[in-house]
Image (spheres, helix red, strand yellow):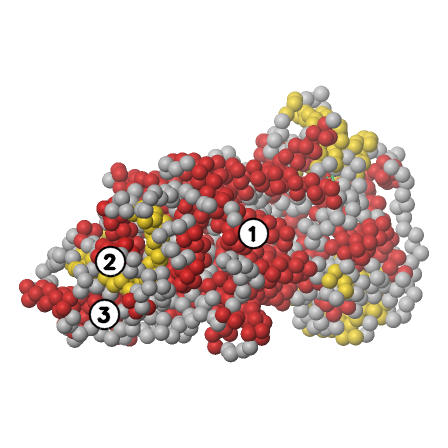
Amino acid sequence: MWNEIFSLTFLTSLLAATIRLATPILYAALGQIFTQKAGILNLGVEGTMIVSAMAAFTVSYFSGSLWLGFISAIVVGVLWSSIMAWLSNTMNAVQVIAGIGLNILGAGVASYVYRIIFGVRTLPPQIDPFPVVELPLLSKIPVIGPVLFCNNVPTYIAFLLIPVSWFLMERTTFGLRVKMVGEHPRASDAKGIHVTLIRNIAVLIGGACAGAAGAYMSTAYMNLFTDNLVQGQGFMAVAVVIFSKFRPGWALVGSLVFGFSNALQMRLQAIGAGIPNQLLLMLPYIVTIFALISTSRKAEMPSAYTKPYVRMER
Amino acid sequence: MMKRRLRSSISTTWQTAVIVVAALLLGALFIAFAGESPLECYGVMLEGALGSMSRISEIMIKMVPLMIMALGVSIAFRAKLWNIGAEGQMIVGAITSAVVGLYIPLPPWLHMIIAPIFGMIGGALWAMIAGWLRVRFNANEVITTMMLNYVALYLLAYMVYGPMQEPGGYNYPQSSSMAESIQLTPLGAGLRVNTSVFVAIGVLILIILFWRSRFGFTVDLLGHGTKITNYAGLNANRTIIWTMMLSGALSGLVGWIEVYGVHFRLLEGIGAGFGDLAVVITLLGKMSPIGILFASFFISALLVGGATMQRMTAIPYSIVDIIQGLVIVLLITQPMIQQKLQARKARGIYVE
Amino acid sequence: MESIAVEMRDITKIFGHKAANDHVNFTLRRGTIHGLLGENGAGKTTLMNILYGLYKPEGGDIFLKGERVDIQSPEKAISLGIGMVHQHFMLANPLTVTENIMAGNFRKRQILLRKDQFRREVLELAERYKMKVDPDSYIWQNSVGEQQRIEILSVLFQDIDILILDEPTAVLTPSETDELFITLRELVDDGKSIVMITHKLDEILQVADEVTVLRDGKNVGCRKIDETVTKRDLSSMMIGYDIDLDLQSTHECTGDCIALSVKDLTVKNDKGLIALDHISFDIKEGEILGLAGVDGNGQKELCEALTGLRPVEAGQIYVKGDDFTGKNSKDFINAGVSFVPEDRRDVGLALDWNIANNLIIKEYGTDAFSSRGLLLRNKIKSHAKEMIERFDIRAIGEDALVKDLSGGNQQKVILARELNGLPSVLIANQPTRGVDINATMNIRREIIESSNNGTAVLLVSADLEEIIQVSDRIAVIYDGKIMGILPGRSSVAEIGPLMLGERMQRHDETASA
Amino acid sequence: KEQGGNGETTGDKLKVALVLPGKKDDVSFNQAMFLALDSYAEANKDKIDLKVVENMYEVADIEPALIDFASQDYDVVFGHGFQFMEPIVKIAPKYENTMFLLGTGYKTVDNSAVYDVHLEAGGYLMGVVAGLATETNKVGVIGGADASETFRGHEGFKAGAKSVNPEVTIEEVYTGDWTDTVGAKEAAIGMYDAGVDVIWHSGDGIGLGVVQAAKEKDKICLGNVADQNTLAPDNVMTGIVYNWVTVIENIFNDINAGKFKGREESERFYWITIENGGIIYAPIIDPKGMLTEEDKAKIEEVYQGIKAGTVEMPEIDEPKN
Ligand SMILES: Nc1ncnc2c1ncn2[C@@H]1O[C@H](COP(=O)(O)OP(=O)(O)OP(=O)(O)O)[C@@H](O)[C@H]1O
Ligand SMILES: Nc1ncnc2c1ncn2[C@@H]1O[C@H](COP(=O)(O)OP(=O)(O)OP(=O)(O)O)[C@@H](O)[C@H]1O
Ligand SMILES: [Mg+2]
Ligand SMILES: [Mg+2]
C-alpha cells in the first residue's frame, strides 16, 4: 500500500484531483470574500450554485455554446443573489434564515425548471464539457505540468481570479469601501459611502462567483445536471472564507486543503487502507476544522458581520 | 403595557398570515405552470396537514423534535453562539441513547431514565467540542458546528454499517430494534404520536423557566458580549461551554425521541434535515419559547401538508421545496414591514 | 442674507412617539462659532444629524446661503460643503489612519487607491493644523484623544464651509482643547462657519460667538456671547431653573483603614506591552484619590487590573488588607469593589437590554433577586424603580432599553448599579464624560456622598476640573508610571507638567501619606 | 376521505402505488422500476391504475405515506427501497386488504413480499468480464453505500474477477451517498490514474459519474441496471441490465390468482435473477478490443453456467429465498 502512495502517478493524480475538487469552492469563496467582508453572511451560496448549474447546463445544451452557458450562469447567479441582497440590505432580514430559505428554494427551483424543460427521459441529456487545454511547454513539466497546466479554461479563470480579487480588495477604492462598510456601516454612511449600494454589489459579486462555480459543476466538472450536483460545496466555500480571513490567497489554500483531503480520502479507500470508508469520508471535514483552528487565534470578523444597517438606529 | 403587547402580537399574526398567503400565491404560479390546479393542490395540502386526527398526529411527530431542537438552538443563539450543528448533536444523541437500549440490560423503567440522559450527554459533548474550539482557539462556531454535522453523519453511517449493525441484518444500515418495553408508547390506536409529546411540553415549560432562572440570565448576558459578561464577574469562557452543552443536550434528547419513538432503532437518515429547520424555527420564533412553539407548529404543518400534497397530486416533487422556501424567505420580511407600518402610524399621530 | 451660512426652520424629528426636535429654528452666521447647548437627550445631535443628512426630518426646511436645500444623505451634505465630527467616533478599528481618512475622501470617479500620495497629504494637513498623527497606525492603536484628532483631520480634508463638531472636547486634554480652539479660530478666519456641541460651559464662553440652547427638543433661546454672559445664565437656560455649579467641598477624609493598596503593580496592555510600570499607592476608607493623566497612559489597564479583569504581571493588590493579586472579577465584586468603566457602551452596559436587567447584572445571583435559582421579577422591577427614582434616570420606565437612553442617563444607570449597596472601593473611570452639566454635578455628588459613607474611591478622569473639585489627593499618571501624588485642591499649573511627564521630587512622602 | 390527482378507481381496477426513494429519471435503480411498472401498467390499462411518487427519501415520511395509500384502499403499494422495510412490517398487518411490496430487504408479513435483485450473480458476471478484459490486472468497483444488495454485488464482482484472473487486484470505493455523482467521478478518475482499466459501478447517480470519468480518461467501465452504452459508446463495454418485468408479472399473477397472501415466510420473495431472465448483460461492444473471442465465449459460458446453476457462487449472506 505504501509504495503505491509514494508513486509519482499517485501523487500526480492526487494533486490533479485536488485542483478539480478545489475549483468550485475557490470560485464561490472568492466571491463570498467580498460578500462577507461587507458584513453579509450569505449561507445561500449552495442554492445559488445549484440554480446556476442548471442554467449553465440548459443554455449550453440548447445553444451548443459552453461559454454562453457559463455567462448565463453568472447572470443567473447575480439575479438569484439579488434576492439575498434585497432580503439582507433592504428588508434587513435575518441573514442566516434568508440563506437557508434560499437554499431550499434554489434546490426546488433548479429541479423544477430542469424537469419542466427536459421532462423524464430514459437517458439524461448530456453535453460535451469544457475540454482540457494543455498549456504548451508548461504542461510537460513532471507532476506540476499535469496538475497545474492540464485543466479546462474555467479552472484557469478561477486561478486568475485570485490576483484579481486581491487587487480589487486591496488596491481599489471599491475594496476599501467594502471593508469600511463591513466594519462600520454608520461611519461609512457618515463619510458619504452608499452603504446599501456597496453591500448590494458585494452580494452580487458573491452571486456572480457562485454562478461561475455552479457552471463549473455542470459544464466543466460534469457534463450533465443532477439535483445533487452541488453537495455541500457552497457551505464549504463559506467555511473557506472564514478560514482565509478574507484573503484571496488563503482562500486558495483553504479550497486546496479541502480538495486534497477529499481526493486523498477516496484514494485511500480505493487502495484498501483498511479503514472503514465512513471514517475516511469524515476526513475533509475534520481537516477543515483543524485548518480553521490553525488560523483562528486572532481571527477578526468584520464588526458589522450579519448586522443590518439602519441609518436611523444608533 | 399588556394591551400594547397584545395589540402588536395581533398585528404580527395578521401580517404573517398575509405573507404566507402571498407566498402560496407565488407557489401557485409554479403549480399552474406544471399543469395542475393550485386550488386543488392547496386543498390537498390543507387537508393533508390538518384534515384528521392522524394528520395532527403526524404534525406532532415533526413538531416534537423540531420544537425541542429549536429550543436548544435558541439557548445558544441568545448567547450569540451560532450553533447550527443541532443536527449533528441530535445524531450523536441518537447514537449514545441507542447504545443504552442495545447493549445495557436495565429494567425498563430505569431504562426510560437512563437512555434520554445518555442522549443528552451525547448531544452535549458533541456541542461542547465546538464550544471548546471557540474558547480555546477562537474557532468560528458556525463553521465548526457545520463541519461537525458532516462528521456526525458519517459517524452514524459508520455505526450502522459497523459496530452497531443489526446482527443477521444482511448488511442493511440499521441497528437491531429496541425492545418494545422501552419504546415510547403511542397516544392512541393507529396514531404515531407518542408520549414524547409530554417530554416536549415538559421541555417547553423548563425552557420558559430557564429564561427566568439565574443561568438563563447569564446566558442572556453572554449574548450582550463577553466583555460585559466578564465585567459582571462571570467567566465568559466557561459560560460559552455550558451554553453550548445545554443547547446540544436538547438536540441529543431529540435523538433519543427519534430512536425510541419514531424509528425504534438507529438507522441512516435519522437527522432528516431537522438542523436547518430548527434554526429557521428559532429565528422565526424570535428565540422566545412561545414564539418557537408557534413557529414549530407552523413549519411542521407546512412539512406534513407539503408531503401529502406531493404524493396525492401529480405536481413535481420540487414544488414542495419551492413553497417552503418561499414561505421562509418572505416570512423574514415581516419585522421590516411591521416597522414601516408602525413608523408611518407614529408620524401620523404626531402630525395631528 | 449673505451673512447667514445655515438656516434651519421648523425642524421636527420624531423617534417612536417622542419628538427629539420639536419645530426647532436654528441659524448659523457665516464666519462664527456657534455653540449648541442642552441637556443629554435635548436633541442637539439629532438636529445636527439632520443638517448632515443622516436623519430625515418629519418637517422643516434647511437653507444654505439663503437657498433651500434637500439633504437626503451625508454624501449630499459633504457635496454641499458640510462636514461633521460625530459624537461617537466614526472610525473603523482594524483599518489604518490613512485608510480611514481616505475612505471619506475619494475623488470623483477614483478607482485606484493612491495610498502613498494620500499618506503624504494626510501628513501635510496634520502639519498645517499641528495635529500629530501616525498615518500608518491602526485606529485601535490610537488613544481616544488621537482618534478625535483623526476624525477632525478627516473632516478638514474635505472641502468644507460648515463644520459641525459634536462634543469634540469630551475626550481631549486641556492643552489639546486649547489647540483645537486655535484651529477652530483659524478656520473661522478663513471664512468657515462652525457649530460646536459641548457640555462644558467654560468652552462656550471661551470660544463661541453665539449659543443656541435646546431643551426637550425645543429651541429655548439664542444668545450672543459677551462678557456679561455667565455659566449660570447658560445652565439655567438649559435646565429651566438655577442649579448649583459649585460642589460644597464638605468632604473630608476621616477613615484610617486602607481600603485599597497597590504595590509595585506591573500590567501589560492588549498588545503585550508594559502598560503599568511598578505602580504603588494606597487609598483609605472614605478617601477619594483622583488619578489625572492624558488618556492612554495606563489608566484603563489600571482599572481593569484593580477589578480582576486583567492579569497582573508583577506586584500586589490588597483590598482591605487581603491579598487580591490574581483573583478574578467575581472575587473583587464580592469584596465590594465597584467599577465604572470608561467604555460604558461596550463593557459596562448591555445596550440592547432594559434598565432593570442592567441594574442587576452583578447581583442577580444573590438572594435579593433570586430564589431557588429563579429570578424574582417583582423584586428586580421594584429595585429598578427605586434606582430610577434615586438617581433621577430619565426614561419611560424600567423596561426602557438602555440604548435608547441618552449618554448621561446611560451613565447614571451604571452609577446606580455600582453605588448601590455601598461599595468598599469604587473605581470610576471617566464617569462624567459626555454627560450634561446637571447630571455631571449629580454624579460627582453621588461619588462624594458614597465616600462620605466610607467608600474608597479611585477617580480616573482626564478632566482636571473634575479631579480638582472632587479629590482628596491627586495622583498623576504618565506612561504607566505615577509621576507624583499631590494634595487635593492643587492647581492646574501644578498638575499640568506632571501629566506631560515631569516627575515630581517629593514623590515618596506624599504617596504613603 | 382524502382524494387527489388520479387517486380514484373505477370498477375492479387494481389501484397501485409506486413509491420511489429517488427520482424516476435517475438512470438507475428507481428509473428501471419506474419504466418497468409504468409499461406494465400501460399494457394493462384496463386492469391497473398506477400512481407514482418520487423522491420519498425522508425515512420519517415513509410511514404516513404508506398509511395514506393503504387507507385510501390502494390494492398494491410498492416501496422501492430497503428504507420501506420497517414501515411496511409495521403498517401492513393493520391494512390487510392492501398488498405491500418491498424493493430489497428481508422482513415480511402475510400481506407483504420482497422483490430483489440477485446482484451477487450480476456482480460475479461483471467481475468475470472485468477480470478477462483488464490489461493492467487492476479493476475497480464503485458503490454508493455498502448496503445489502450493493455489498453483495461487490462481493460477487470480486469473486468473479478472481475466478478468471487470480492475479487481479481490485480497488473498491463507496462514496457514502447514492446521488454523489461528483464523488463517484473523482473516485473513478483516481482508480484510472492508478492503473485500473475496468470499473464496474453499482448504479444510481454515482453511475453517471463513473461513466463520465471513463469517457474523459478514455477507459472502460461496465454499466448497471440499464444498458448505459449510449452514455459513452466508446467506453461502456457492457453491463448488467435488470428486467423487472418478469418479477412484476409474477407479482401481479400471484395477486390476480389470489396467491399473494397466506404464504410461508420463505416464499414471500420475488427475485430477479440470471436464472429467470431478470438479469441479462448488455451486448458486448468492446470498443478497445480488450476481449478475445475466447473471452467473450467464456463470459457467455459463465452466464449460461449461472443460469443453469452450475457455476459455484461465493457464500454471501443474503435474505432467505
Ligand atoms: N436614532 C434614534 N432613534 C430613536 N430615538 C432617538 C434617536 N436618536 C435620538 N433619539 C431621541 O432623540 C432625543 C434627542 O437625542 P439627541 O441624541 O439629539 O440628544 P443630544 O442632545 O445629542 O443628547 P446628548 O447630550 O446626550 O448627546 C433623545 O431623547 C432620544 O430619545
Ligand atoms: N433607539 C433610540 N430610541 C429612542 N431614543 C433614543 C434611541 N437612541 C437614542 N435615543 C435618545 O437619544 C438621546 C441622546 O442619546 P445619545 O446616544 O446621543 O447620547 P449621547 O450623550 O450622545 O451619548 P454619549 O454620551 O455616550 O456619547 C437620548 O435621550 C436617548 O433617549
Ligand atoms: Mg448628542
Ligand atoms: Mg452625550
**Residue at mark 2 to residue at mark 3: CA–CA distance:** 26 Å
Residue at image coords 82%, 41%: C201
Residue in front for this viewpoint, D113 or D187: D113
Residue D189 image point, x, y percent? 25, 60
Residue B312 image point, x, y percent? 41, 46
From the viewer's perspective, is the residue at label 2 or at label 1 nearer?
A: 2
Residue at image coords 17%, 74%: D312
Q: Chain of mark 2?
A: D
Residue at image coords 49%, 39%: B24
Which amino acid, by three-letter code, is at mark 1? Ser
Q: Quadrant of residue C6?
A: top right
Name the residue that disc number 1 marks. Answer: B296
Kind of element beneath mark 3: helix
**Residue at mark 3 to residue at mark 1: CA–CA distance:** 48 Å
What number of labels is visible? 3
Residue in front for this viewpoint, C359 or D256: D256
Taking the image as shown, residue D29 lies to the left or right of residue C253, namely left
Sort mark 3 into few (<14), some (14-19) or many (20+) by Cα contacts within 10 Å. many
Name the residue that disc number 2 marks. Answer: D250
